[in-house]
Image (spheres, rainbow, N blue to C red):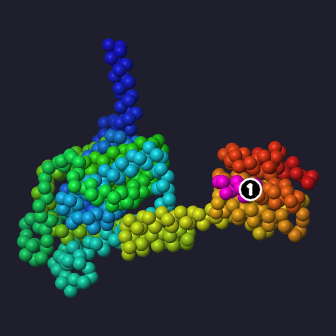
Amino acid sequence: MKKQFKILVTARRVFDRNFAAGIGVVTRRSASTDIVAGLTLAALGIPEVMGYAQIAGMPVQTGIATLLLPLIVFALLGSSRHLVVGGDSATAAIMAAGLAPLAPAASSQYVALAGMLAIITGVFLILGRLLQIGFLADFLSRSVLIGFLTGVGIHIAWQQLPKMLGVASMPSDLGSISWVTAGLSAAIVCFVIVARLISKRIPAALIAIVASIILGAFSDVSAHGIELLGNVPSGLPKIGFPHGAWSAMPHLWGVAGAMFLVILAQSAGTSSAYANRYRESLDENRDLLALGLSNIAAGLSGTFVVNGSPTKSEMVDDAGGRSQLAMLSTAGVVVIVLLTLTRPLESLPTAALASVVFMIGVGLVDVAGLRQVLRMRRNEFLVAFITTLTVVFVGIEQGVILAMILSVIDHLRRSYRPNDTVLTLADDGHLHAVPLHNGVPISPGVVVYHFSASIYFANAERFRDEVLALTEIASTTIKVVVVDSSGIADVDYSGGQMMLELIEQLTERGVQIVIANAPEDVRREFAIYGVAALLGENAYFTTVSSALRAFRST
């Protein structure tokens, strides 16, 4: 009996360590709150994911299915208590742009390609966890994401206008607008806007969808030119590997790579924000693995790529949900909807769904965010704005790639030209940074140089030129250059070779160079490159102050 008890305890520990960390301890009070939050998410989120299916070019029921098996997998395996995983506008738009040349939207071939794409994306996420390359998402800065999502929002909203106006395409068919269809779309858009102004908790999209279904079911709207959604299969998604997608694999890799980066950036940012808000622990590696498995589950259940959704996570949080139990209750509602409520969807006017999707796109356009970036960092605004234009006029995949390239270029520009300074003693006796061009010795014959970036191939010559320039101060003879290395995190091979050459040049001038505040990694790299041997045993100081004391009499 005692042995059986130990086995049960061990099994419980293994379960708690590997499953349901996002659920945590459940009490009667917390369970009721989470269940209500889950019902709220179902009411608000189901119309939203139907819209995402429209964006993705997928059948409506597959959007609803993103809130079933993928949601359950993350709820049980993830560590975040708040992140909601499901269909997402950004990844849906990337997918649609990538698959459009390969198959007609919503066709069986298209659905198979979407399933394979979800599986590949899931594999990428798992490999990202195993190879620890999740840092790639860091190259999509917040300002770039604002520009990217704004471009996606404009792209989505523009795509919905033909269905909202009852025409085949824009702007060539503007002369044949169905004014009844346009009137219905305008009414829905106005209702959603007014409802959001009153309270964001009002399920405006759900009310609009239900009212439109009633209108389509009990009136002959088709006779007035309003198109209905048509057949929507009922039942739970079938589990199976997507067939007929192998020939498109080379094309799918690139699309999956773009989605991998967006999922990394968006999901990690959302889960971290909530963990910080509620001071909870978060295992990002575990969440990355869970996101990968959720996408594989999406592919195997006939739906499309899922992502950690900021909007749906906020829905649950606003409703009081504090654990993944809320998401499991949402999945329960989705089962009921898929089994019993798909037939009424056949009477839904396509213009109504397009109007809901249009508002989703408008919601992604972050004018306030762009204005804030413009006010605070003009160069970052330029990067964000170029990203927006690329997404709108070139393509979403290209926008992701360009966003990363521009972010890296902006980073390199700043690290190539760091804000280097010279340290002097203020009136209160403390060290004070002044612009480099002032070239003020801190004491007779001694100048302290602060380099505020890692030394690598692009800025190594800049380091050398600035140090040599400091030794040529006209007002005094410099004998010692103290390098404050507190801002140097790494020195690459080019930087190491430059240091060797610089030491020799300074020696010829009768100038000694010493290192202060060097991190342990930098000292080790100096030793590997031979810099430490050339500097000598007494060239390292723990602080700038200790270096100054040693050369006070210089």
Magenta stretch, residue numbers: 492-500
Q: Residue 530 at what x, y percent from top left?
A: 74, 48
Residue pushed farthest right? 553
Residue 541 or residue 521, whichever sits in front: 521
Left or right position of 473 against 164: right
Q: Residue 215 at what x, y percent from top left?
A: 12, 67
Q: In the image, what residue occupies the spot 35% across and 53% down? A: 121
Q: Does the magenta segment cover residue 546? A: no
For mark 1, what is the residue? 499
Could you tell me what secondary structure mostly forms the magenta stretch? helix
Left or right position of 363 against 354: right
Q: Quadrant of residue 501?
A: bottom right
Depicted 173 relative to depicted 152: above or below? below
Q: In the image, what residue occupies the spot 88% across and 51% down? A: 551
Left or right position of 275 against 256: right
At label 1, which amino acid type do we have? Met
Depicted 27 relative to depicted 444: above or below? above
Q: Residue 246 at what x, y percent from top left?
A: 27, 54
Q: Residue 145 at what x, y percent from top left?
A: 45, 63
Q: In the image, what residue occupies the spot 14% across and 71% down? A: 227
Tag count:
1
Residue pushed farthest bottom? 175
Q: In the image, what residue occupies the spot 26% across and 72% down? A: 160
Q: Does the magenta segment cover residue 495? A: yes
Residue 300 or residue 141, whichever sits in front: 300
Q: Quadrant of the C terminus?
A: bottom right
Secondary element at image label 1: helix
Q: Quadrant of the N terminus?
A: top left
